[in-house]
Amino acid sequence: MPNIKFLDLISTDTLLADGAMGTMLHARGVGFDQCFDELNLTNPSAVAEIHREYIEAGAQLIITNTFGANRFKLTKHGLQDDVVEINKASVDLAKRVVAASFKEVLVAGDVGPLGVRIAPFGRVQPEQAREAFAEQIQALSEAGVDLIVIETFSDLYEIREAINAAKQTCKLPIVASVTFTRDDRTLLGDEPMKVARTLRDAGADVIGVNCSGGPAQLLRLLKQMKQAVPDGKFWVKPNAGWPEQVGGRIMYPADAEYFGDYALSFRESGACVVGGCCGTTPQHITVMKKALATSEYSPVLIQTPDIFETSETPDAEPPTQFAQKLGRGEFAISVEMDPPRGLSTHKLIAGASLLADAGADVINVADSPMARMRMSAWAVCDVVQRKVGIETTLHFPTRGRNLLRVQGDLLAAHALGIRNIFVVMGDPTAIGDYPEAMDNYDLVPSGLIKLIKQGFNEGVDHSGTSIGQPTNFFVGAALNLCPSDLENEIKNLHRKVKAGADFFLTQPVYRPEDGPRLLEAYEARHGKLDKPILVGILPLVSVKHANFLHHEVPGIFIPDEARKRIEAAGEDGPKAGVEIAVELIDQLKAWAGGVYIMPQFHKFDMVAEIIEAVQ
């Protein structure tokens, strides 16, 4: 059973927790580049002194110095093998300080984020995250903490894994606390009411909000979270305002007296535990203790109606012509074009017109291919659609875009009538014109597909807020038909299918049997793939070109026969390249939904010849 002492206390009184640990350590000269958690072993007296000061200030609950004591964060300091030792040392240290105080003080085991993105927004899988959390929580539990505090999270996927790990590892009460940005959303865009419901449904005993801005913001957030979960128990630990750098030091503007006023407001608004986060000190806790002692406890249960209003949603736009053609089971032809490196679009329009006249169904516009500076891909899509009259597919890389830009660009694309989207990771900036350029991203491709198909196409953004009317994006994803790791490719393919991908574009192939081999392996594990595949076709132009692709480009295999034909053709290499491509496409029609042709060296005439030959 959960710790009755803690749950009993917060059901009859407002418990006062401690303030910041990091702020106090930094004030003692510990640099932010150092591992605070390691101090439990290397400088325990500094940590113990801070615990003692908070207890003397009136804290009834102190938190262990283990915020970053998980395997992922400790690895950055070469301490990944010391997870258990560091966590247990922190608990032993806190319990010794409590025993010496001769006061009734609870010890909470502190668990912070892993410091890495987990799926679907990163590469760390949920089970890996859960294992890391479980390792830390088990150490804290075995050392004898009274409860587990999972705090300062911004990713609901990650905090759910932490809660699951706690529930599977121990029987202690669980506090789950989230931090918000200045716009009252988490870093990933979730609003307070959704956060509260998610934490409740995940099994947290106490719903928390911490860090973020100052007391005013957290009081506002607390009220909204209480509206969402009226019978919930709440934990509130604000920063001492928004930090600013003054003379090389990090300063927080909210003084101790200001916190005293808000301690009462937190209690009256339903908080069961109050305390401080970054920038707060024992002085803040002293004033909060005095304020809470001035009036009797009277819990407030806020009963409010659902603030969400329903309204009729405008009808979504019809599917794109490209989507309709694939939906009818007809063989589609897509051709890739790169945006220009300068302002002129004349050659681009001329090439697109030639391809449209030849019978291409859609033009794929790449976004900064090879990480080279080019005109915006969605501006090119708009120009092609307006001036040539052919639909486009916008390549939409996740790399280099945060959640704000991703969603803003999606709205802009839809407003311009660009509704075929090809989601891809994108080329790393390190290989391009600006290797020092920012290369971060908030979403992996499967996460962006899910955001579009299960969010925007349903009429809501990532946080669940209405965008006015649903979008109608037709979403494609990447597929490698001849991967070096078949099992991993099948796993990624299935993840994209579950996220809602409508079609797939593949890397160039030169053997028609590559597709059926992968599809049979997928079907054996997950059932038949019912999404159309447009197979990559990259026409060969010379033996030098063929040898380069075969020997130097990962994932491309060109049979000896094809390379010998190109070599024998000599100066007529492009003609032989057309013939090889036409023969290959005729064979692909038995199982592929279409082809995705990638012109080399801007030889659009070759592609036009191929299109006319296969239609």
Image (spheres, grey):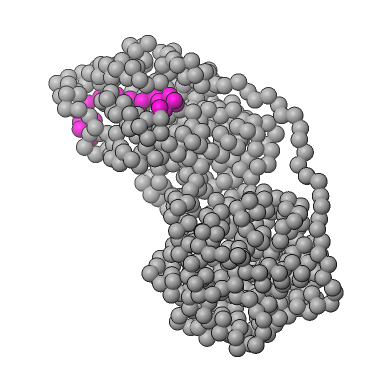
Q: Is residue 550 left or right of 295 when viewed as pictured?
A: left
Q: Which corner quadrant holds the N terminus?
A: bottom right
Would residue 498 be seen by someone viewing this image from the given angle?
A: yes
Q: Is residue 521 left or right of 40 when viewed as pictured?
A: left
Q: Which corner quadrant holds the C terminus?
A: top left
Would residue 360 be seen by someone viewing this image from the given angle?
A: no
Residue 33 image point, x, y percent: 48, 71
Vertical placement of 537 versus 304: above or below?
Answer: above
Vertical placement of 480 versus 231: above or below?
Answer: above
Q: Which residue is drawn at 57% across and 46% down?
A: 403
Vertical placement of 562 versus 22: above or below?
Answer: above
Q: Is residue 530 left or right of 551 when viewed as pictured?
A: right
Q: Which residue lies furthest to the right in this view?
A: 295
Residues 168 and 553: in front is 168
Q: Residue at x 50, y 83 (%)?
A: 44
Residue interval drawn in magenta? 528-548
Residues 312 and 135: in front is 135
Quarter of the figure with residue 358: top left
Residue 568 image point, x, y percent: 14, 21
Q: Does the magenta stretch include residue 128?
A: no
Residue 311 image point, x, y percent: 76, 32
Residues 379 and 525: in front is 525
